[in-house]
Each structure stands twice: as C-alpha cells, then as structure tokens.
Image: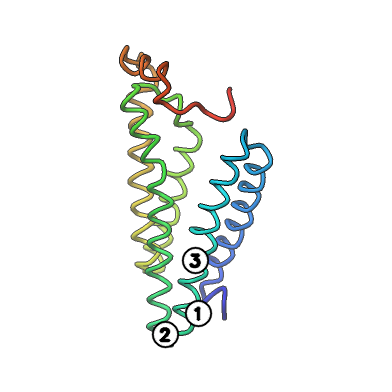
Amino acid sequence: MFLAPVPGSYLVATVNGFGILVEAVYVTLFFIYAPTKAMRAETAIIFGILDVGFLGAAIAATRLALEGEARIDAIGVMCAGLNIIMYASPLSAMKTVVTTKSVEFMPFMLSFFFFLNGGIWAFYALLVRDIFLGVPNGTGFLLGTAQLVLYAIYSNAKPSKNAVNSMEEGTQHEPLIMS
C-alpha cells in the first residue's frame, strides 16, 4: 500500500493527504498573488527541489532499496524529519519577534494552531505508542508553546529604537499582505 505503509495508519495517511491538498492550494495562491516574477520563480525552484524532488527521491529510494520493516522504519524516519522541519519553520519569525520586540510578524492564530496541532498529534502518538509521530509532534508542541510564550511576553511591548531603525533601513522583510 502506498499511502499507508504501516497497517492501520489510515488516520495519519488521511490527514497527511488533506495536508498535501491544503499546501497545494496555498502554494497555488502564492504563485497567483506573489508580487514579482522573480519571487515566483525562486519559490517555484525551491518548491520543486524540496517538496517534489527531495520527497520523490526519498520515496523512490526507500521503495526500491528496502523491504518490509526496514522500509517502514526508513519512511517513518523521513516523515519525522520532514515534520520537525515543518514545526521549526517559524523559528525565523520567533527571532524577528525577539529582535524587534514586536509580534507583528508572528500571527497569534498561527502560533496557537501550531501549538494545538503538535499537542493533539503528540497525544495521539502516546496513545498508539508511535515514536515516529511522537518525536516530531512533541517537538512541534514544545515549539508552539515557545511561540505562545514569546507572544505573551512581546504582545504589549514597544519595539526597540534599534529594531525600528533596522526596519526603516530595509533589513527587515515586510509582510506580503498588509493588515
């Protein structure tokens, strides 16, 4: 079976399939509304290499080179690594929050749902005793918690003068959609 290599893992396969659909819609909308052709091209190249090329090569290698339990373990390690990367992606936003002392570039709802998603999946992993789900989602739960703590610390803080100056000099990226 391609979508669920571990027997009984249809819940995880279904949720990940829906996640692929949502990500495809998000990337498509980004390509439609991206401000410049250069940004679209750069994003397309990165998307092609990381999301399509790397994942396709990893799946092909595990399907061709490994059998049985070794294949399941390799796919589990690969998926756990990709999940940890997904949960670690807001680290740059967290750095920006600390640098600017402002939560302008880290939306509360995104942080809250990272926290919630990591927590629910980590709890599920504990129930089914699946280390491949538990490690990345436990990491996501901890990173989501750190985001919420940062949000609480800096939500009413005034941006420092140095952060405002660096934003005016253009070293800080501006959001694509202004609120």
Q: For marks 2 and 3, give the CA distance.
A: 16 Å
Kind of residue indicated by mark 3: Leu
Percent coordinates x, y for residue 65 in the rendering: 43, 85
Q: Nearer the viewer, residue 9 or 176?
A: 176
Mark positioned earlier in the residue sequence (2 or 3): 3
Mark positioned earlier in the residue sequence (3 or 1): 1
Percent coordinates x, y for residue 78 in the rendering: 40, 67
Mark positioned earlier in the residue sequence (1 or 2): 1
Give the mark toward the camera: 1 or 2: 2
Write down the residue under mark 1. 7
Percent coordinates x, y for residue 60 in the rendering: 50, 77
Q: Nearer the viewer, residue 21 or 41?
A: 41
Dot 3: within a 10 Å radius of its alpha carbon, few (fewer than 14), some, or many (20 or more) residues? some
Q: Looking at the image, which residue sits at the far front?
A: 38
Percent coordinates x, y for residue 114 in the rendering: 45, 44
State whether residue 174 is above or below residue 34: above
Q: For marks 3 and 1, give the CA distance.
A: 22 Å
Image quarter hosting the C terminus:
top right
**Mark 1 vs 2: CB contact within 8 A:** no
Q: Secondary structure at mark 3?
A: helix
Horizontal relation, residue 141 to residue 3: left or right: left
Q: Secondary structure at mark 1?
A: loop
Kind of residue indicated by mark 2: Leu
To which quarter of the image does residue 97 belong?
Answer: top left
Write down the residue under mark 2. 66
Judging from the image, the colouring scheme is rainbow
Q: Nearer the viewer, residue 77 or 148?
A: 77
Q: Which residue is rendered at x = 42% and y = 16% of the image? A: 168
Write down the residue under mark 3. 55
